[in-house]
Amino acid sequence: MSELHYSYAKGVKAVIFDWAGTTVDYGCFAPVATFIDVFQKKGIDITEDEVRKPMGLRKIDHIRALCSMDRIVSEWQEVFGAKPEEKDINALYDNFESLLFSILPSYATPIPGVVELVAKLRKRDIAIGSTTGYTKQMIAIVSQEAEKYGYTPDCIVTPDDVPAGRPYPFMCFMNAARLGIYPLRSIIKVGDTISDVQEGANAGIWSVGIIKGGSELGLKNEQVLKMNPSELSRRMNNVREKFYAAGAHYVIDSVVELDKVIESIEECLSEGKFSDVQKQQLFC
């Protein structure tokens, strides 16, 4: 059994990162492109905005969410004469899985600054956990590729390991158990989607939203650099408001700013402060 790092006053003991859009795949484009392609092959056009709304969920749940959207249901009825059923969702998922496996190795490059940030955290004796909407087989490909660039978390938990994925808190609980970290208030969850923020909030741990590089902003690095500053600010503020509404304790522009957040959280912990966002029951 792992030694429990039990300490109310010793600060942050673990950071649980999301994968695509937070630590790898700037802008979270691998699943987006795949969802669009899979639906197009069925004669259904879906938009990037529609795809990104349920981002962070377990992938088959993501397809279910897409197939419940009124516009997509209407278009499906026009093409097939009926609403999408579970057999259609399973068929879409099978196609999604096979296509995603073929492109995942190209979307596993760590987001700039992540490898250096993790090195800083480890020097502070902070463990590195992770959760994902990818299956165990999918994240095996991503993690193997990311390792080549120097990013290797101490723990990886997928929806396959727990009763339910995001926004339920079970993957965070599994990270805590495997890492031997307690109490939960010494853990931070970091992610780039609404379901990431809700996952952390529902687990009763510190929840941090990331804007740049994430799915909610949905821009490539070069697009961020070239965008009109006022337009970029408007888009980022919109994402920021969504994250706070979802229960985030902190929202930062970039993942590399996390060390400043840790300092703020450790100050709060030393003063006995912690906001119990579980009371919001965000996933109900």
Image: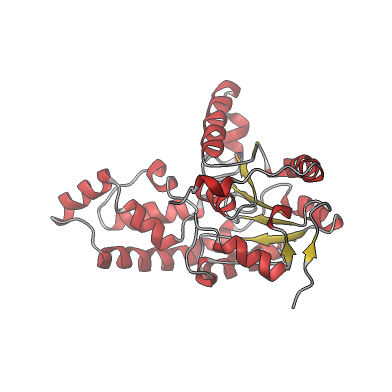
Nearest the camera: 226 or 256?
Answer: 256
Q: Vertically, is 208 above or below 158?
A: above
Q: Quadrant of residue 265?
A: top right
Q: Vertically, is 53 above or below 132?
A: above
Q: Residue at x 44, y 61 (%)?
A: 59
Which residue is situated farthest in the left direction here? 81
Q: Is residue 193 visible?
A: no
Q: Position of residue 76 (x, y in %)?
A: 21, 52
- The total of numbered circles placed on residues is 0
Q: Is residue 189 visible?
A: yes
Which residue is situated farthest in the top direction here? 230
Q: How is the image coloured?
A: secondary structure
Q: Position of residue 65 (x, y in %)?
A: 35, 53
Which residue is situated farthest in the right direction here? 123
Nearest the camera: 185 or 86?
Answer: 185
Q: Position of residue 273 (x, y in %)?
A: 73, 42
Nearest the camera: 157 or 274?
Answer: 274
Q: Quadrant of residue 237?
A: top right
Q: Position of residue 229 (x, y in %)?
A: 60, 23
Q: Residue at x 40, y 48 (%)?
A: 51
Which residue is situated farthest in the bottom direction here? 1
Q: Residue at x 33, y 63 (%)?
A: 92
Direction from residue 204 to residue 93 in the image, left or right: left
Q: Quadrant of the N terminus?
A: bottom right
Nearest the camera: 184 or 125?
Answer: 184
